[in-house]
Image (cartoon, rainbow, N blue to C red):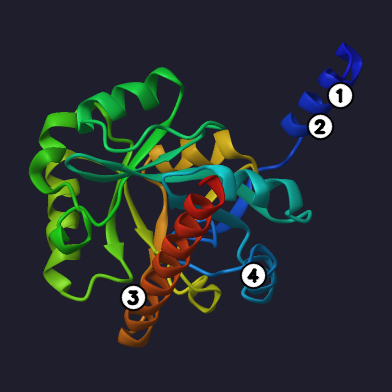
Amino acid sequence: MPDKKTRVKKETSSEKKAARKLVMDLHIHTLYSIDSESELHEIIDTAKEREIDVLGITDHNTVEGALHMKRIAPDGITVLLGQEVKTTEGEIIVYGLEETLPKKKELLETCRMAKERGGFIIIPHPFDRMRSGIGNRMLDILNYIDAVEVFNAHNRLGHFNNKARAFAEKHGLPMVAGSDSHSYEEIGFTTNTVVAEPEEKSILNAIKSGNSVMVAKKSGFKYNIKLGIIKLKKKRQLRKLKKLRASASC
């Protein structure tokens, strides 16, 4: 465990990081998700190539991918610790926690749990019911929402994004866009730019202030097909693994 001098030095160093323009991809899945095979180094290489400064890692129901990415990310790339949590009413993204929240709890209970631990809540693809959007259930958790994803690159129907924007504007909620990338090729298709220090707290505060500038581009139908194929493939692998484990325990 570092001594006080070491800790103070690290904190002081962090405080001295100057605020600057940061390009962010806020909705990224890695091989830690059931529907992605993106290796962490592939994501990092693509981020460097496309000049992405901030990677928001949001694997399904786990923060482990984000923690791993944070450990290996090179200087110049800031990693936001995120997780896309499945509740009984749909999905939410929680940033800022080092622990995985339990899945399939009630929406309000999950939001309370996240906030008690200091989490930052973004609602992804809220009106896409085919992909676990919580829709107008946002009205039940307005006081917990830090931002709404008003453009999701995987939304096939434009009105899903339009409804999300209209809701955010009506209720005065900060807006962000998400690539929802499940393959490393999609990194940076959709970005957000803020002026902030290159560390998590400053970046999340900038998003909360509503000063994020979005550049939105749909991912393309081929990536939706690829996502489905990967999901089926990984589910088969998991079933085989469960059978092997069951056989070994007999």
Contact, mark 2 vs mark 1 (Cβ under 8 Å)? yes
Q: Residue furthest bottom?
A: 222
Residue 236 occupies which quadrant of the picture?
bottom left
Say whether disc 3 or disc 1 marks the residue closer to the N-terminus. Answer: 1
Q: What is the secondary structure assignment of the residue under circle 3?
A: helix
Mark 2 lies on residue: 13
Q: Residues within 10 Å of mark 1 (few under 14, many from 20)?
A: few
Left or right? Give the position of 58 relative to 154: right
Residue at image coords 39%, 38%: 209
Q: CA distance from mark 3 to mark 1?
A: 47 Å
Q: CA distance from mark 2 to mark 4?
A: 24 Å
Residue at image coords 47%, 41%: 206
Residue 9 numbered tag: 1
Mark 4 lies on residue: 51
Residue 201 occupies which quadrant of the picture?
top right
Mark 3 lies on residue: 228
Residue at image coords 21%, 54%: 132
Q: CA distance from mark 4 to mark 1?
A: 29 Å
Of badges 3 and 2, the one in the foreground is 3
Say whether disc 4 or disc 1 marks the residue closer to the N-terminus. Answer: 1
